[in-house]
Amino acid sequence: MNRLTNGRALDDLDAQLIALFAAEPRIGVLEASRRLAVARGTVQARLDKLVARGVIRGFGPEIAPAALGFTVTAFVTLEIRQSRGHDQVAAHLADIPELLEAHTITGTGDLLCRIVARSNADLQRVIDLIVSYDGIERASTIIALSEQIPYRVLPLVSAAAE
């Protein structure tokens, strides 16, 4: 259950706190309290609440797949055999390290996946792994040529705090 502050999911302090930890994840609670000019306990309590509400899902490093040698990004739409259900397909997909995320979707497909590969030839290997499961009937792949806007949430955080 999300608790709203003044009818909003976030207030200005929450937004500032999220932005600060997004920019400098190793900053620490004490330094964050100094920079935001609030008590250390306030920062800790706010972080705890944001984590408990699921707003903040982690403090880990952001990884760039291309820096690890996975220079090809693709989006794959999967059509699945409905009798098998989404859960079994998702369990199969979770075993593929190159599959970064999967979402149940509306429209012509059933699942949309973001995958990475080391090359176009390696992309074929990853797609073959994906479709090797009997519950997947068809895959349609789109290769990303370049990233125009990287995954981001800070503009959304700012909008939520307004």
Image (tube, helix red, strand yellow):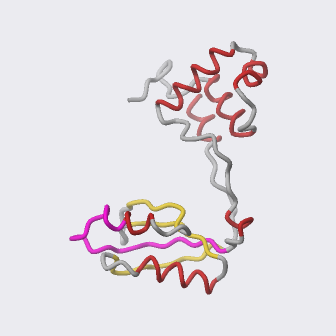
Q: Is residue 138 left or right of residue 52?
A: left
Q: Is residue 35 left or right of residue 77?
A: right
Asked if residue 31 is positioned above or below residue 137 in the image, the reply reads above
Q: Which x, y percent locates residue 80?
A: 32, 73
Rendering quarter of residue 74: bottom right
Q: Which of 143 and 61 lies nearest the eye of the viewer? A: 61
Residue displayed at 36% across by 62% down: 106
The reply to whether the magenta stretch includes residue 78 is: yes
How many labels were placed on the picture?
Answer: 0
Asked if residue 82 is positioned above or below residue 128 in the image, the reply reads above
Residue displayed at 74% across by 65% down: 67
Span of residues in magenta: 72-89
Q: Which x, y percent locates residue 22?
A: 69, 39
Q: Which x, y percent locates residue 91?
A: 37, 64
Q: Quadrant of the N terminus?
A: top left
Rendering quarter of residue 65: bottom right
Residue displayed at 60% across by 82% down: 122
Rendering quarter of residue 107: bottom left
